[in-house]
C-alpha cells in the first residue's frame, strides 16, 4: 500500500486537501472558459504595427511583411466578432474602417459610448457619413495622439496629414518591431527543429537516451499530495491571496491601476510560493535533521555553470517547435479558443515601466524558480522513483499544465512540461530546467513587449 507508513491525521489532511483542490481546480478551469483568448488581441496588435510600419518597409520586402492590407485584415477580424462583445476602442475601429454603405454604421453609430472622447468621434463620423464632403478640423483629433494607430485611422477617414505624429523614424521603429516579431519565432523554430532532429538521430543511433542519475528526497506520495494539494493549492492559491490582495490594496490607493495590478501579481506570487516552499523546507529538515543551503538537496547542480545554462538553452530551443505545433493544431481544431492566462493581457496593454519591470521579474525569475522546485525538483524525482521515469515525466507534466488553470492552454503547457522534465533528467540539473523555463516565459514576454505601440 502506497501510504502504509502514514498516520491517520496525515491521511485525513491529505484527503481534505485533495477534495478542496478538486473543487478549486475544476472551478478555475471552468472560469478560464469565460476568459477571452489573448491571441485575438495579439493578432490585432501585430496588424496595427504592420500598418504603422508600411512607409518604412523596403519595396522588395513588402510582399513578405504585408500580404493583405492590415486595416482590411483588422476590419475582417472585428467583423467576425459580435459588435456588442468588442471593446469600445475596437467598436470605434470597426466603425471607422467600415465602408460608408455598411449597415453596421447606421445600426451602431449612435451607440452610447462611455468614453466622452469616443462620443465626440462618433458625432464626427456621423457628420461624415451624412455628408461625404464634410471636412473636420484636424486639431479636433489631437486628443487621440496618444493612440497613434487610432489617430492614423482618423487621418485616413477625414483626409488630414498625420506625418507629424507618424514620423519616418517612428515608422522605422515599427518596421524593426514587426521584423523581430516575425523573425525571432521563425529562427527559434528553425534552430529548434534542427536540434530536435539531431537529438532524435543520436538517440536512435545509440538506441538509448542519456538519462542522468536523478536523486529524489526520501518522501512518500502522500508528502507530494500535501505539498501540491495542501501547500500549492489550499494555502498558496486559496488562503495566501487573501493576505496579498489586502496588503496591496492597503498601500495602493494613490497609485495607477496598472501599477496596482502588477503589485497584486508580484506580491500574490510571492505569498503563493511561501506555503509550499515552507513545506519543502520542513520536509527536508525532518528527513535530515537540519536544513543547509550548502547541501544541494534538489540537484540544482549549478556547476559547471556554463554546462547548466547551455543545457537549459538547448532544452528551450528544442521544445519550442513542439509547443508551437500543438498550439497551431489546437487553433485549427477550435475556433476562438478561450482561457488565456490573464497575465498576458495585462502585459500586452501595460504602459507603466515600473509595472512592466515587476511583471518581468515575476514571469522570468520568480515563476520559473518556484515552479521548477515544486514540479521538477520534488514531484518529478519522487514519481520517477515509484513509477518509472516515463510515467514520472508524463504525470508531472500533466499536473504542471493542470495547475495553470487554463483549459485552452493545457495541451501546449503539457508539452512544455514534458520538455522541462526531459531537460531536468537529461542534464542532471534542476538549474537547467529553471533556465529553460525562464527563457520560455522571457520569449513570450518579449513578444508581448514588442507588440506595444
Image (spheres, rainbow, N blue to C red):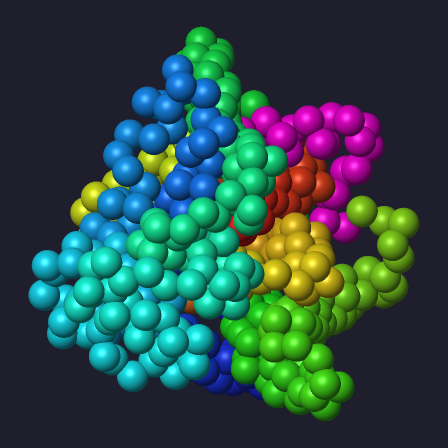
Q: Which of 420 and 250 lies nearest the eye of the viewer?
A: 250
**Numbered marks: total:** 0
* Relative to 117, residue 37 above or below: above
Residue under the point 32% across and 41% down: 70
In the image, taking residue 247 as reference, residue 330 lies left or right, namely: left
Q: Is residue 46 visible?
A: no
Give, as a single range, the part of the protein colored magenta.
297-320
Residue under the point 31% across and 54% down: 157
Whole-percent x, y for residue 54 in the image: 42, 33
Q: Which of 302 and 71 lies nearest the eye of the viewer?
A: 71
Q: Quadrant of residue 275?
A: bottom right
Whole-percent x, y for residue 156 in the image: 34, 49
Identity of the residue furthest to the top in this view: 205
Instruction: Give the prevailing secondary structure in the magenta stretch.
Output: helix
Q: Quadrant of residue 276?
A: bottom right
* Relative to 36, residue 27 above or below: below
Q: Which of 249 and 28 lies nearest the eye of the viewer?
A: 249
Q: Is residue 209 visible?
A: yes
Is residue 5 highlighted in magenta? no
In the image, taking residue 135 as reference, residue 447 lies left or right, namely: right
Whole-percent x, y for residue 374 in the image: 62, 58
Residue under the point 47% across and 36% down: 53
* Relative to 407, residue 433 above or below: above
Residue under the point 41% across and 51% down: 160
Whole-percent x, y for residue 419 in the image: 49, 38
Q: Quadrant of residue 124?
A: bottom left
Amino acid at each position: 500500500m502506497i501510504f502504509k507508513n502514514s498516520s491517520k491525521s496525515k491521511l485525513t489532511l491529505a484527503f481534505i486537501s485533495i477534495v478542496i483542490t478538486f473543487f478549486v481546480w475544476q472551478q478555475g478551469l471552468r472560469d478560464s472558459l469565460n476568459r477571452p483568448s489573448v491571441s485575438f488581441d495579439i493578432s490585432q496588435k501585430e496588424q496595427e504595427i504592420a500598418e504603422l510600419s508600411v512607409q518604412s518597409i523596403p519595396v522588395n520586402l513588402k510582399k513578405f511583411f504585408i500580404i493583405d492590407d492590415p486595416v482590411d485584415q483588422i476590419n475582417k477580424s472585428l467583423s467576425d466578432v459580435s459588435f456588442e462583445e468588442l471593446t469600445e476602442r475596437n467598436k470605434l475601429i470597426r466603425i471607422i474602417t467600415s465602408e460608408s454603405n455598411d449597415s453596421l454604421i447606421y445600426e451602431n453609430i449612435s451607440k452610447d459610448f462611455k468614453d466622452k472622447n469616443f462620443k465626440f468621434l462618433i458625432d464626427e463620423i456621423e457628420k461624415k457619413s451624412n455628408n461625404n464632403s464634410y471636412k473636420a478640423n484636424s486639431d479636433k483629433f489631437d486628443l487621440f495622439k496618444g493612440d497613434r494607430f487610432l489617430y492614423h485611422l482618423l487621418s485616413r477617414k477625414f483626409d488630414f496629414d498625420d506625418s507629424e505624429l507618424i514620423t519616418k523614424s517612428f515608422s522605422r521603429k515599427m518596421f524593426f518591431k514587426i521584423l523581430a516579431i516575425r523573425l525571432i519565432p521563425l529562427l527559434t523554430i528553425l534552430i529548434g527543429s534542427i536540434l530536435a532532429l539531431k537529438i532524435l538521430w543520436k538517440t536512435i543511433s545509440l538506441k538509448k537516451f542519456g538519462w542522468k542519475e536523478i536523486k529524489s528526497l526520501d518522501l512518500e506520495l502522500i508528502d507530494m499530495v500535501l505539498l501540491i494539494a495542501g501547500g500549492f493549492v489550499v494555502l498558496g492559491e486559496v488562503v495566501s491571496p487573501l493576505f496579498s490582495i489586502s496588503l496591496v490594496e492597503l498601500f495602493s490607493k494613490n497609485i495607477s491601476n496598472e501599477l496596482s495590478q502588477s503589485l497584486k501579481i508580484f506580491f500574490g506570487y510571492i505569498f503563493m510560493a511561501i506555503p509550499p516552499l515552507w513545506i519543502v523546507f520542513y520536509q527536508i529538515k525532518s528527513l535530515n535533521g537540519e536544513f543547509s543551503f550548502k547541501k544541494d538537496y534538489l540537484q540544482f547542480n549549478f556547476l559547471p555553470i556554463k554546462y547548466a545554462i547551455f543545457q537549459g538553452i538547448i532544452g528551450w530551443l528544442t521544445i519550442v517547435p513542439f509547443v508551437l505545433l500543438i498550439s497551431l493544431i489546437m487553433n485549427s481544431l477550435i475556433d476562438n479558443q478561450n482561457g488565456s492566462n490573464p497575465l498576458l493581457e495585462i502585459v500586452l496593454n501595460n504602459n507603466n515601466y515600473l509595472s512592466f519591470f515587476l511583471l518581468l521579474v515575476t514571469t522570468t525569475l520568480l515563476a520559473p524558480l518556484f515552479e521548477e522546485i515544486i514540479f521538477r525538483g520534488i514531484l518529478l524525482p519522487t514519481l520517477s522513483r515509484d513509477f518509472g521515469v516515463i510515467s514520472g515525466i508524463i504525470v508531472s507534466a500533466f499536473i504542471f499544465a493542470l495547475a495553470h488553470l487554463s483549459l485552452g492552454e493545457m495541451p501546449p503547457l503539457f508539452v512544455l512540461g514534458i520538455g522541462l522534465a526531459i531537460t531536468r533528467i537529461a542534464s542532471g540539473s534542476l538549474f537547467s530546467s529553471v533556465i529553460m523555463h525562464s527563457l520560455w516565459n522571457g520569449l513570450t514576454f518579449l513578444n508581448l513587449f514588442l507588440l506595444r505601440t
